[in-house]
Image (cartoon, rainbow, N blue to C red):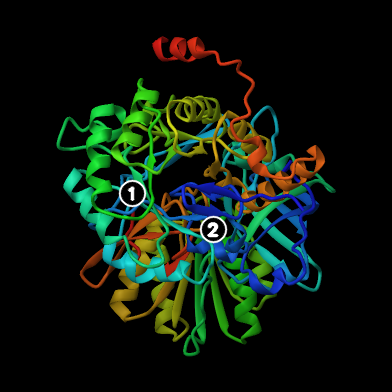
Amino acid sequence: MVDLSVAIGDLRLKNPIMPASGTFSEELAEVFDLERLGAHVTKTITRDWRDGNTLPRVCEVNGSMLNSIGIPSKGVGSFLEKVVPFYQRYATPLVVSISGNTEEEFATLCREVSVDGVDAIEVNISCPNIEEDGKAFAIRPSSTHKVMRALRAATDLPLWAKLTPNTGETSEVASAAEEGGADALVVANTILSMAIDIQTRKPKLGNLMGGLSGPSLKPIALRMAYQCARATKIPVIGCGGIATAEDVIEYLIAGASAVQVGTATFIHPTAMVTIIDELEAYLQAQGLSSVRDLIGTIVDDGQDEAVVFMEAAP
Amino acid sequence: MMDLKETPAPAGEKDVFKSFELALAVKSNDPVNGEYHRLVLEAPEYLLARCQAGQFFHLLCPTANGETPYLRRPMSIYGFYPQKGELHFLYKLAGAGTRALASLTQGDRLNVLGPLGVPFTIEDGWQNLVLVARGVGLATLAPLALEARRLGRKMTAICSARHPDYLMSVDYFRELGADVITLTDAEGTSGVDNLERVIEELIAGGRADAFYTCGSNRILKLLQTIGARHGLPGQIALEQQMACGIGMCHCCVRTFQRGDKLLQLRVCREGPVFDMMEAVAW
């Protein structure tokens, strides 16, 4: 038997595969046994009711998709009453994803979801900070540090900071999150994109722009996961374009301690289970006793300059 | 990995889960007339036993003609036959997804996810059912007609299309004992005024306890007006662009009026079948 378990700080996961926020919900329990997963990660909630964005909210591009759903949310009350109890029937750790438009709102929500049954809080700091210029907290190191300090003061639960690829300062933002009190980094959210229907000349999304996810995001998110793993001492959870066990292995080698599977679940709802089985088979075939033997094993000969070059590239 | 391989549900799972991701073999995939194709898949009994009229499957279209549709495509069930082991879909060539479906031939495998969504219901007091649909929309109502016959209900199927040649499922509805009324653009009988007249006659004759429809905005508005006028209920199967099909992504919402509140509901999860009076015309 190979050991698939990994540790994200003090939190032990039976395997490194968990869903990405927004691509998972209670309904998936009607398709496979959710107890198979390393963790459960809920769709981002806000404190108050949100309707979500204008339709169309999704469109496909070659081999990937764009979305601008707009975080429809029933608010924190409904979440604590209905969603948290649902997941308490599972032994699998529950990670709650939250978002806020101001530091204060974010921290308040963080305090409110710090309840029994919640094992970690994923803070979606890729959302706009309306107190500054509407740019996401995680675009800049300074706003990242500030919001993480506020969140850290609001809870004793592990805090996972979900970073955005819409920044030119990946390593600096990662370090700022670590210094601000993050226990782990989720790398990364979707990258801002757009698509236009050439017949109607209209944007294909009701919100004009949206986040790219799926296989074409993978090289970008993988690069970021690598940078974050090098820049910090806290665990990195890779996220972006993972659809196969090979993708997972690549992220682990780059330095991720676990991964999140997102859009692949829309294509194959059982993708995460298939990936867990194939990861185990791979380790067996390679004669590795633990999945942890893969983490951070990239053969990069310490090429610091390559990272510097990438950061400087336009 | 995760191509169109055989993925039988492990022992035990068949009893626990509501929906399954399976690669089913194609038995046939033939044009029905100029615009429509009928796809027949070989399906296991446990899958077919779970299907209900009005539900849909989410189909992973194959790569064809240099096109690879990335997201699945939702498609309502045209027929499910546990004894024959068959699952049927009726589709109209419309975009990359349906073009890819049309490329499937006998023995190919198609990855399906389902059954999904809320089915039609036939309440005890509804003895005389009126089915109204246009074009390929009739496909969605076909399994409902089968269920209505099983329950011994009387049925009138009002089938509307551009041209008599494109009237789908008329013979099928007749076989099931429905009175069939055909309306076509070519004959000038498919206008809203004429449809209203036809339905009012049915109501006057005591032959309309409930309505079932799908797809058409024009028909929905008319049925809502008639339903309000006579206090008659109805159900509508709605379509919407989908990504996950299960309820995770919230991309397929539509607006509904419940009391004085406007609600956003997911077509994949709270639907695709909704209370006809609550649907907001688009």
Query: Which of these two is toward me, B180 or A237?
Result: A237
Residue assigned mark 1: A71
- Distance, label 2 to label 1, CA atoms, is 32 Å
Residue B20 percent location from the top left of the image: 66, 61
Indicate which disc residue A248 carries.
none
For label 1, the SS is: loop
Residue beneath disc 2:
B137
Residue in the picture at 41% in, 71% down:
A85
The quadrant holding residue A156 is bottom left
x, y percent for residue A254: 57, 29
What chain does badge 1 belong to?
A
Q: Quadrant of residue B101?
A: top right
The chain under label 2 reads B
Would residue B67 appear left or right of B275 to someone viewing this image?
Answer: right
Q: Amino acid at mark 2?
A: Gly
Q: Is residue A214 above or below residue B178?
A: above
For the residue pair A113 and B181, the one nearer the viewer reads as A113
Q: Nearer the viewer, residue A212 or B152?
A: A212
Q: Is residue B242 above or below residue A287?
A: below
Residue A33, horizontal then vertical, whole percent: 62, 64
Q: Is residue A130 visible?
A: yes
Q: Report which quarter residue B19 is drawn in.
A: bottom right
B247 or A308: nearer the viewer:
A308
The answer as to whether the residues below labels 2 and 1 share one chain is no
Q: Position of residue B235 (x, y in %)?
A: 44, 71
Q: Residue at x 47, y 15 (%)?
A: A307
Q: Is residue A100 visible?
A: no
**Front: mark 2 or 1:** 1
Residue at horizontal 26%, vertical 61%? A112
**Mark 2 and 1 residues: CB-CB less than 8 Å, in contact?**
no
Residue type at tag 1: Ile
